Image: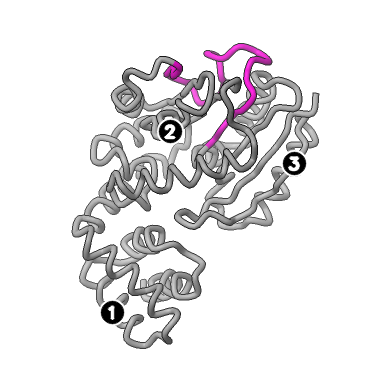
Amino acid sequence: MAEALDAVLGLCADGELPPGIALAQLCLAATDEQGARHALAHALADAAPAPRRRLAAVYALWNATPAAFAVTRAVASTSAEVDTERTPATWARAFDAAAAISPEAAVALYSLGRPDLLASATAEIVDDLRARGVLGADRRVVDVGCGIGRILAALAPRVKEAVGIEVSAVMIAEARKRCAGLENITLAPGSGSDLAPCSSAAYELVLFVDSFPYVVASGPALVVANLREAHRVLRPRSRLLIYNYSYRGSDDDDRHDVSRLAGELGFHVLENGRRGLRRWDGAVFDLMRTG
């Protein structure tokens, strides 16, 4: 446990983890809340000025979010079933349980269950999409694994139409509340293996925002199926954006797989696993359908 705590705190002190990510990982690495707080306090006391400022931001965030430890641990515990069987059905049950505890933490554990932190991280993703030139009043978007609809709601004023697909019934229900009154947003239950609600060659952007790791965890056949479906629904020279390919802990392995699969399935890689977001440590994979 001590090694895991030290590793998290070291990455945070070095500026490699945003405060929300660091706090969520700290809570998961500790045996109990007292141990986590003690480790953070000890790291703060021993840190040089610049690392101390980064660790102090985690300390301040924790003080402002007293339920962070309990929420993080409770939401993380809902995935226990998928340790033995990783299928869209078991993920759906886990997401149902997580969303019932905290809709915000269920889609982004680093939000610590706080709507304001989730909104800030969501806005950064939308800013990144805008900078890539993939948004616009004429664009149609598919958000795969849309969760509680946070990306859809943020994109609604910036695109012509957006379709959200989600395997979790509880999350779809939350998304319907969040997107109520947004006439250009459509929500549909998904199988996890196809984009059946979407027409072929009808969209300019397909998004997987922190949902593709669950596809990868479910096996290579599901990865290929999802990428083939993304290719099917996209227009030629349109984009597939994957924010986090896997949770395997190896950017090099992810980049290798994305490069290989892109070549096999009709995509050109524009960006292969860049990490540059400030509020979230997600790696971005930007692909274009080639034909």
**Dividing the image into 4 quarters, which one contains the N terminus?**
bottom left
**Closer mark to the observer between disc 3 and disc 2:** 2
Q: Quadrant of residue 90?
A: top left
- Residue on which disc 2 sits: 154
Q: Is residue 25 visible?
A: yes
10 Å crowding of disc 3: few (<14), some (14-19), many (20+): many
Left or right: 79 in relation to 261:
left
- Asked whether 204 or 171 is in front, the reply is 204
The spot of residue 122 in percent (x, y) is 43, 42
- Residue on which disc 3 sits: 269
Label 1 vs 2, first from the N-terminus: 1
What distance separates the C-alpha of mark 1 from that of mark 3? 43 Å
10 Å crowding of disc 2: few (<14), some (14-19), many (20+): some
Left or right: 124 in relation to 94:
right
Label 1 vs 3, first from the N-terminus: 1
Disc 3 is placed on an element classified as: strand
Classify 206 as above or below 216.
above
Disc 2 is placed on an element classified as: helix
10 Å crowding of disc 1: few (<14), some (14-19), many (20+): some
What distance separates the C-alpha of mark 3 from that of mark 2? 26 Å
Label 3 vs 2, first from the N-terminus: 2
Classify 159 as above or below 197.
below
Q: Is residue 156 magenta?
A: no
The magenta stretch is: 184-208
The spot of residue 178 in percent (x, y) is 32, 27
What distance separates the C-alpha of mark 1 from that of mark 2? 37 Å
**Closer mark to the observer between disc 1 and disc 2:** 2
At label 2, the amino acid type is Ala
The spot of residue 276 in percent (x, y) is 58, 56
Label 1 with label 3: CB-CB less than 8 Å: no
The disc placed on residue 41 is 1
